[in-house]
Image (cartoon, rainbow, N blue to C red):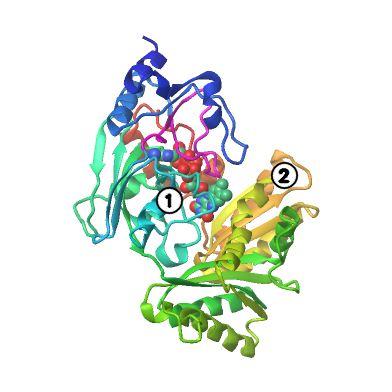
Amino acid sequence: MDIIERLRAITGPANIATGDDCAPWASDWTGNYKGQPLAVARPGSTAEVAAIMALAHETGTPVVPVSGNTGLAGGAHAPGQLMISLDRMRAVREIRPAARTAIVEAGVILSHVHDAVAAHDLVFPVTLGARGSALVGGILSTNAGGSNVVRFGNTREQVLGIEVVLPTGEILDLMSELRKDNSGFDLRDLFIGAEGTLGIITAAVLKLQPMPAAYATAMVALPSLGDALTLLNRLQAATGGAVEAFEYMPAAYIERHLRLRPKARAPFDQRHAVNIMVEIGATAPRDATLNEDGSLPIVDLLEQTLGEMTEEGGVLDAVVARNEAQRAEMWARREDAGEMSVMQQPVLLMDVALPLDGVEHFLRQAETAFHAIDPEGQSMVVAHLGDGNVHLSMWPSKAGIPQSDAIVARIEDVVADLGGSFSAEHGIGKAKRATMARRKNPVALDVMRRIKDALDPGGIMNPGKVIP
Ligand SMILES: Cc1cc2nc3c(=O)[nH]c(=O)nc-3n(C[C@H](O)[C@H](O)[C@H](O)COP(=O)(O)OP(=O)(O)OC[C@H]3O[C@@H](n4cnc5c(N)ncnc54)[C@H](O)[C@@H]3O)c2cc1C
């Protein structure tokens, strides 16, 4: 039997796509990574995933796990390779409100996790613009960030346990619900963020948080990013660390957004260089219960801080959302960032992490570095400022590989000089392998290679990704 017949025998023929039926998986969200896979297998259980991996191991067939295909680094690109999609494994197995955990299969769509736990007044606090398409397996495998990292940390911090199928087909059961477990190496965190190069995540135990009973959300214009950090730190002190999003959108971003959505409104009548969208989530009844005059204490607190900073000259203007529609409008402006980045091609996408007080220097130096090489080039910045994560999109005036490489390498220099990281939340995939080779500590790279060789001696698990 050839491999396709053997795959059909494992999953049932309806769950092996070949030829044109692979079209839904043959291109990623950006459209930059296209390619006809050998086939797409859609197993319905961990046992089927294990049987497929054992077959791939035996036949030396390269395997690429795919979830929502919204990754921005080409991690699920699979021309001529066998893709494994877990989209049929979409059970929310159990929600345990008292333990604050949810046990889910890896094929559950992120927004479905949100909906399922909301019924218990709980949140899984990983959220991003692609939440309607990205799956739990993809979120874990990229250690996704998103807009709540300022309060809750990355995906890694929201996971208690995982189940993984290894490249040999063995099942590694790490489905712990424990918050403390010092029993040897932390294998869970090896697979989270590995972008499918070490195994296939099939299930997870997720950590849940209480759902805020009220939000205070605002757009704020400030004189500088230094003032923005003052605002962040004051709000964190006043609310006990309840700032859930702190998103930076400079004037050029707002202008591009209005070009993408001509019917959208500008946040302010005047153009401001520094615009922040801030959101605070209140869980305590004292912050979230309406006052007699109909105001909300958490909103009052935000307005009070903004008022004080306005008097000091640290805030130039502010609009506080008065209802859910206004809040949604603020979020929509921020969540259009992905589309704004890829609507003009070719684009150089940089996703970098910096110390919070290094972001302002970075932006100045990066712009100088870019325009020194390409004076006519255009760029756009948007940042999860609360966790120091800058997304820099650059559109060179003349598309050409040597010029693009020079621009990227020069910006990497700026990041390194400021003690930053060349990869904050989107991962390495194919897009940043050259950067890994240039920038990653060589000893760390060597350790990664040794781990990869030990777990995947045949090199069949997502080959050509992450490790240069
Ligand atoms: C509009 C938009 C907004 C975004 N915003 C953010 C953001 O704010 N923060 C952020 O971090 N990212 C963001 N992203 C990037 C992307 O959504 C995330 O990287 C997401 O985690 C990818 O999930 P996915 O299900 O689409 O995974 P995929 O793209 O399918 O896969 C991503 C990687 O994980 C591997 N993989 C997939 N499933 C498994 C599995 N079960 N086991 C092992 N490996 C697996 C793949 O091989 C690939 O290497 C955004 C993307 C878009 C399009």
Q: Gap between marks 2 and 1, in whole Å?
A: 31 Å
Q: Is residue 462 above or below residue 244?
A: above
Mark 2 burial class by Cα count in 10 Å: few <14, some 14-19, many 20+: some
Could you tell me how many numbered marks the image carries? 2
For marks 2 and 1 on the same chain, the one whose residue lies earlier in the sequence = 1
Q: Left or right: where does residue 306 sit relative to residue 259?
A: left
Which image quarter: residue 30?
Answer: top right
Q: Left or right: where does residue 221 sit relative to residue 281?
A: right
Residue 466 visible in image: no
Inspect the magenta stretch and tell me whether residue 83 lies in it.
yes
Q: Which is nearer the eye, 1 or 214?
A: 214
Q: Which is nearer the eye, 157 or 432?
A: 157
Inspect the magenta stretch and tell me whether residue 158 lies in it.
no
Q: Is mark 1 within 8 Å of ligand 1?
A: yes
Residue displayed at 71% across by 55% down: 261
Query: Disc 2 on helix, strand or loop?
Result: helix
Residue corresponding to mark 2: 403
Q: Residue furthest top?
A: 1
Residue corresponding to mark 1: 143
Segment colored magenta: 64-89
Q: Left or right: where does residue 350 sit relative to residue 40?
A: right
Disc number lying in front (2 or 1): 1
Q: Position of residue 34 (x, y in %)?
A: 59, 31
**Which quarter of the figure is the N terminus placed in?**
top left
Mark 1 burial class by Cα count in 10 Å: few <14, some 14-19, many 20+: many
Q: Position of residue 436 (x, y in %)?
A: 51, 45
Which secondary structure is most common in the magenta stretch? loop
Q: Which is nearer the eye, 349 or 314?
A: 314
Q: Amino acid at mark 1?
A: Asn
Residue displayed at 71% across by 65% down: 265
Q: Amino acid at mark 2?
A: Gln
